[in-house]
Every structure is written in structure tokens, then in C-alpha cells.
Image (spheres, grey):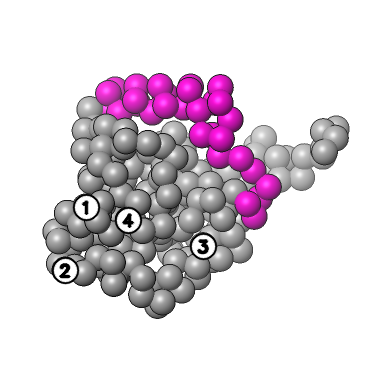
Amino acid sequence: MQVRWYFDFVSPFAYLQLARLGPLRARLAIEPVPVVLGALLKANAMLGPAEIPAKRAFTYRFVQWQAERAGVPFAFPPAHPFNPLAALRLCLAAGGGWNAVETIFAHLWGRGQAGEDAAQLAEPARALGIADAAAAIADPAVKAALRANTEEAVAAGVFGVPTVRAGDELFWGNDATPMLEDWLQRPQRFEDGPYRRLATLPVGAERAR
């Protein structure tokens, strides 16, 4: 079964889920897939939580609380939301593997450092063996790979990050991690009983747009 983890460095929930994926990665071959959250939101005509003032305030407190509760090293970057494109491209330029993912997330969310350009990402770039971060981030092949990843996610129905895609199933959000673990134990979990009805539940009313 192919398992892919769609993430964007702008998401603190992706950082928190990263810490919970360790036990699953010991059992499954999970491939990290950097994508552009803004493009996913646009494709689904959605706003991000940081774009709604009241939701932004709650979300920041919630994620800080979750990090403290989980005992995960955590610090907000200097500003949020920030432009994650440079970090996403650096990840791909470094091979896109788990070491690159963890190194960049630790810089941004473990230590609360900025990461919107090559200068701000110089430290993780060096740690990943990239001497010229600016050239790596500007590489047309890297940019094309990020676009392809994001288009793949949209085509798969991904609407937010983090999302785990296991076969044809999507599990969105850090708080869906236990749901994923449950499903892995019983892959038919959501095909029986009340879950069967949910796939064809009719829409009762639609909000005017």
C-alpha cells in the first residue's frame, strides 16, 4: 500500500504530526510530499485558519497547548503565516527525504526561526549539505517538482495539511492520527455500520454564496 504524507512547512499541525509519525514509519513506508497549502486552499475555495481573525487566535493557542501537552519542542516563527515556498523548495533540493523534512521543521518550529528566503534558511541548508541555498531554491526543476506535488495532491482530493493518503483513504490533520492508526488495524473500519451511510448522505440545505 502506498502511503504519502502531504505537508507544508507553514503548518504547525504538520510539525506536530511529524513527531507522531515515528512509530508508523517503523511499520510503513511513508513518503513525505511537500505541497503548497495556499494552492490547496485556492483549489477548494477555502480560507486557511490564519486568515480568519478569531480562528487564528484560537488556532495559535491550540497548537501551543498541543505542543506543551505532547512535550514537543516548539516555538512560533517571528511571523505567521509566512511564505513557505523557499523552505519547500529547499526540502526538495535536498532530496525531499525525512532528514530534510525534519531539519527544516526543526529550524522553523522547533527553534522558531524565520525561513522565507535563502539567507534565513542558510543554517538548515548547510546541515543538509547545500552550500548555495539561493541556487538550490531557484532551480527550475525543483520548482517544477513542487508544482507537480501540489497538483497531485489536488487531484487526490487533498484539501489541507497535514494529510496522510493511505491507498485511497485520506486522513487530514494531526488530530486524525489516532483515526489513521485505528484504520491501519482494521482497513474495513469505515465501510460498515453507520459509516456506510455517510458516503451517500444527502445535502439538506446549502448556504447562499
Structural distance between the alpha carbons of marks 3 and 1:
21 Å
- Number of numbered discs visible in the structure rendering: 4
Q: Earlier in the sequence, mark 3 or mark 1?
A: 1
The residue to which callout 2 is attached is: 131
Q: Is residue 182 visible?
A: no
Q: Position of residue 188 (x, y in %)?
A: 54, 48
Q: Earlier in the sequence, mark 1 or mark 4?
A: 1
Residue 150, disc: 3
Crowd rating for badge 3 (residues with CA inside 10 Å; few <14, some 14–19, many 20+): many
Q: Is residue 123 left or right of residue 8?
A: left
Residue at image point 30% right, 49% down? 115
Residue type at the position of mark 4: Asp
Structural distance between the alpha carbons of marks 3 and 4:
20 Å
Residue 48, disc: none
The residue to which callout 1 is attached is: 103
The residue to which callout 4 is attached is: 117
